[in-house]
Image (cartoon, helix red, strand yellow):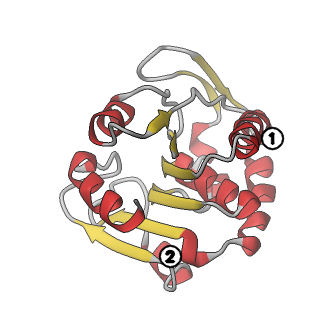
Amino acid sequence: MTIIYLHGFQSDGGGSKYENLKSHFKNTKILSPDLPANPKEVQAQINTLLNALKERGEEVILMGTSLGGFYSLFFSAVHQLKAVIINPSIEPYETLERGVGEHQTFKKGRPYYFKQEYLEDLRQMKSAFEKLNHANLYFFLSTDDELLDHSAVAAEFVDAAHLSWWDNSGHRFTRFEELLPEVERILI
C-alpha cells in the first residue's frame, strides 16, 4: 500500500506531516511530492504517479490538507481512490485569490508563483467532484481553523464514510500525529 500526502498552498512535500506518516505507518510506502503552483502541472504530476502505481497493482490512499485536500478530492474522483481530507479548501478559486503573486515555499524556499489564471483552472477541476464516491472520503476538520470555515464541507459531504471535528488544531491541524491512529483504524 502507498499513501500519497498532498500538501497545501505554498508548502513543500517532505515536511513534518510526511515525517509523522513515515513514523506511524512503518510498513507503508509514503510519498509526499513537492507540488508546483500551477494546478495543470499538479494534475500531470500526480496522474503520472497514480497511473504508475496502478500499473504495479498498488493500493493507494490519498491524503491532503487545505489545497492538498482539494487536490485529494479531485484525484479521488478521477481515479476512484480513498482519500483522507484534512481542513480542505473546497473552493480554492475563491479563497486563494489573496494568494496570487510571487512567493517562496515555507520549508524549502522554492519559487512559488501563483497566477490569476490558476484560479480558473481550480474552478474547472471542481467539476470532477460530481464523480466523487462519498464512501471513499474521510474528513477531519478543525473547529478552530483560522483560515477556512468548514461548515459547507460538513453539509456537502454529510454522507462521507467519516467526518469528525477536532478542537484546538487550527488550520495547520497541529494535532495531526494524534489523528494517525484513527486513520489507521478506519482505513488499514
> What's under tag 1, amino acid-wise?
Glu
Q: Residues within 10 Å of mark 1 (few under 14, many from 20)?
A: few
Q: Could you say which disc has been placed on residue 16 in the image? A: none
Q: Height in image: 9 above or below 137? A: above
Tell me where residue 103 appears, x and y as whole percent: 56, 22
- Residue 106 spot, x, y in % from top left: 43, 23
- Residue 152's tag is 2
Q: Residue at x 43, y 67 (%)?
A: 139
What residue is shown at x 51% (from left), y 85% (from top)? 159
Say which residue label 1 marks. Answer: 117
Query: Which image quarter is the C terminus in?
Result: bottom left
Within 10 Å of disc 2 (Cα), the crowding (few <14, some 14-19, many 20+) is: few
Q: CA distance from mark 1 to mark 2?
A: 25 Å
Residue 138: which quarter of the image?
bottom left
Check disc 2 and give the amino acid type: Ala
Quadrant of the image occupied by residue 113: top right
Q: Earlier in the sequence, mark 1 or mark 2?
A: 1
The one of 11 and 73 positioned closer to us in this rendering: 73
